[in-house]
Amino acid sequence: MNTLLEALYETDPSSASLEKTAEAALLAGLQPEQASAENPFLNLPTEDLIKLASELDAPEAEAVIEEDSVDPELEKVAFDMLGGQIMAHAMVHEFGLMKVAMSQGVCRVCKEQSMNIEGSTICSVCLESE
């Protein structure tokens, strides 16, 4: 049995070399000489970095970010998605309550009266109120 499992899960030598190639490419990409071209803040002195960071914390910067980030269409879509999720959760919850009520022989609508109509899942009181 062990030889069968070893044969089934034996690592392919070509995949191991592919992993090593990908790892080498990742490590080469993380080297400082390539990172300096992509990171404009790499060669800045610490004082300048602190000054830039403090400017980001300014209230004016937050106001600009808040004004630019509010998209009415995106906000409407997010509101509609949240409403749909809440409705879906409510429906699943109600279906669960209906299932429990019917398994106990109680009306699926009022969940209080017993089902007294042959072949129906609601009671005569709820049927008359429709």
Image (cartoon, rainbow, N blue to C red):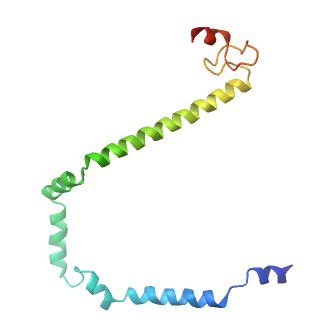
In the foreground, 27 or 82: 82
Most extreme residue toward the right, as rendered?
Answer: 1
Q: Is residue 129 left or right of residue 45?
A: right
Residue under the image location 39 percent in, 86 percent down: 29
What is the number of callouts on the image?
0
In the foreground, 76 or 36: 76
Residue under the image location 24 percent in, 54 percent down: 69
> In the rendered view, would you say 119 is above or below 32?
above
**Percent of width and height locating residue 84:** 45, 39
In the foreground, 30 or 67: 67
**Percent of width and height locating residue 16:** 61, 88
- Which image quadrant is residue 79 in? top left
Viewport quadrant of the N terminus: bottom right
**Percent of width and height locating residue 112:** 65, 15
- Which image quadrant is residue 102 in? top right
Viewport quadrant of the C terminus: top right
Residue under the image location 15 percent in, 65 percent down: 55
- Which image quadrant is residue 121 in? top right
> In the rendered view, would you say 41 is above or below 86?
below
Q: Is residue 115 left or right of residue 128?
A: right
**Percent of width and height locating residue 94:** 58, 30
> In the rendered view, would you say 104 is above or below 86?
above
In the foreground, 35 or 95: 95
> In the rendered view, would you say 89 is above or below 129?
below
Residue under the image location 78 percent in, 84 percent down: 7
